[in-house]
């Protein structure tokens, strides 16, 4: 039986922490759908199209990973993708509280989809897209936190 997992997020931008989780789960499941949320309430720095393009190019070496943009309820997108697992990365205990609430609601909305939590690698536990955006917006060096393609995208957008 093939198992498809969906790894959702805003990925604004995709970081080395996200890449690490994607790589690790690509070895656990037959197919991974990295689902990039439109999420206008977060006021993303990169457009949905830019985020999708960056993630697609960066994750190309992982042959069982597909990148898609999405809008709406995650459980609906997961069902459309025939995913039976939602993957969520956890950096800290504070993430766990929020993620447990979301997992419980997702389970209530679609009991056929399980949520699994992947602990961030210790070297990425401090890393978040919002911190990376903040540093980059002040011309700080984010090269160790993102793929070179993301670094180039920041340079183009920030001048």
Image: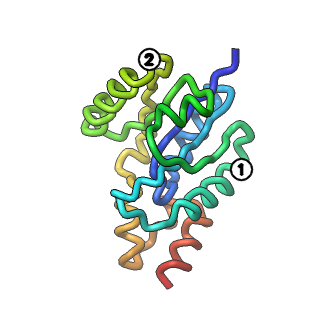
> Looking at the picture, does residue 117 appear above or below residue 69?
above
Q: Residue 79 sits in which quadrant?
A: top right
Display colour scheme:
rainbow
Of the numbered discs 2 and 1, the one sitting upstream in the chain is: 1
Residue 108 percent across, percent down from the top left: 36, 21
How many numbered marks does the figure carry?
A: 2
Q: Which of 73 and 144 is in front in this view?
A: 73
Q: In this view, does 156 lie to the left or right of 62?
A: left
Label 1: which secondary element: loop
Q: Is residue 110 left or right of residue 24?
A: left
> Looking at the picture, does residue 107 appear above or below residue 71?
above
Residue 47 percent across, percent down from the top left: 51, 65
> Looking at the picture, does residue 63 appear above or below residue 43?
above
Q: Residue furthest toward the top?
A: 1
Residue 10 percent across, percent down from the top left: 45, 52
Q: In this view, does 21 lie to the left or right of 108?
A: right
Image depth: mark 2 or mark 1 in front: 2
Residue 131 percent across, percent down from the top left: 35, 61
**Any mark on residue 60, and which?**
1
Question: Which corner quadrant holds the N terminus?
Answer: top right
Density class for disc 2 (Cα within 10 Å; few <14, some 14-19, many ≥20) is few
Identify the residue under disc 2. 111
State the residue at coordinates (62%, 35%).
32
State the residue at coordinates (44%, 25%).
115
Label 2: which secondary element: loop
Density class for disc 1 (Cα within 10 Å; few <14, some 14-19, many ≥20) is few
């Amino acid at each position: 039986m093939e198992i498809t997992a969906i790894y959702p997020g805003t990925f604004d931008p995709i970081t080395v922490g996200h890449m690490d989780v994607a790589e690790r789960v690509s070895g656990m499941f037959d197919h991974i759908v990295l689902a990039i949320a439109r999420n206008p309430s977060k006021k993303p720095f990169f457009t949905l199209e830019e985020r999708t393009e960056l993630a697609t190019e960066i994750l190309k070496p992982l042959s069982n990973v597909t990148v898609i943009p999405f809008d709406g309820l995650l459980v609906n997108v997961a069902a459309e993708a025939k995913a039976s697992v939602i993957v969520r990365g956890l950096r800290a205990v504070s993430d766990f509280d929020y993620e447990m609430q979301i997992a419980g609601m997702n389970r209530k909305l679609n009991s056929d989809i399980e949520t699994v939590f992947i602990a961030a690698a210790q070297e990425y536990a401090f890393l978040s897209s919002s911190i990376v955006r903040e540093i980059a917006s002040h011309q700080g060096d984010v090269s160790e936190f993102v793929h070179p393609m993301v670094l180039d995208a920041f340079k183009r957008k920030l001048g």
